[in-house]
Amino acid sequence: MASTEILKSDAACFAFLGECGSVPFTGSNADCKACCEAKFGNPPVCAGRVELEGGVPHCHCYGSS
């Protein structure tokens, strides 16, 4: 079972900071997060997710507010 602290941390990571990298983004979520941290810093970046926009993968950067 996941700890409450982990769930709170994941739930707090929802604020869209912007995009990173080329389009289409060909890397993994880990590559995306590294790109986001290089562009926006850590903090505020808490996640980088490869998400589809119109069927095309983009690297989206998220922070905790």
Image (tube, helix red, strand yellow):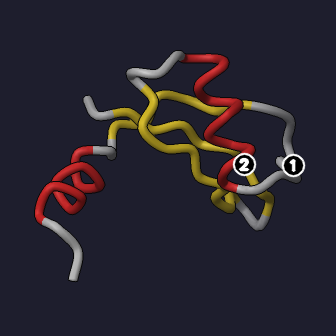
Residue at the image position 23 percent from the left and 45 percent from the top: 12
Going by the numbered disc 1, the residue's amino acid type is Pro
Residue at the image position 47 percent from the left and 28 percent from the top: 17
SS at badge 1: loop
Chain-order first, disc 2 or disc 1: 1
Q: In the displayed structure, would residue 34 be above or below residue 40?
A: below
C-alpha span from label 2 to label 1:
6 Å
Residues at marks 2 and 1 touching, judged by CB atoms closer than 8 Å:
yes
Q: Which residue is under mark 2?
A: 58
Q: Quadrant of residue 40?
A: top right
Q: Which residue is at the far bottom? A: 1
Q: How many marks?
A: 2
Q: Which residue is under mark 1?
A: 24
Question: Crowding near pointer 2: few (<14 within 10 Å), some, many (20+)?
Answer: many
User: Could you tell me residue 20's position as x and y percent?
Assistant: 70, 31
User: Could you tell me residue 24's position as x and y percent?
Assistant: 87, 49
* 22 left or right, relative to 18: right
* 43 left or right, relative to 24: left
* 46 left or right, relative to 25: left
Question: Crowding near pointer 1: few (<14 within 10 Å), some, many (20+)?
Answer: some
Q: Quadrant of residue 14?
A: top left
Going by the numbered disc 2, the residue's amino acid type is His
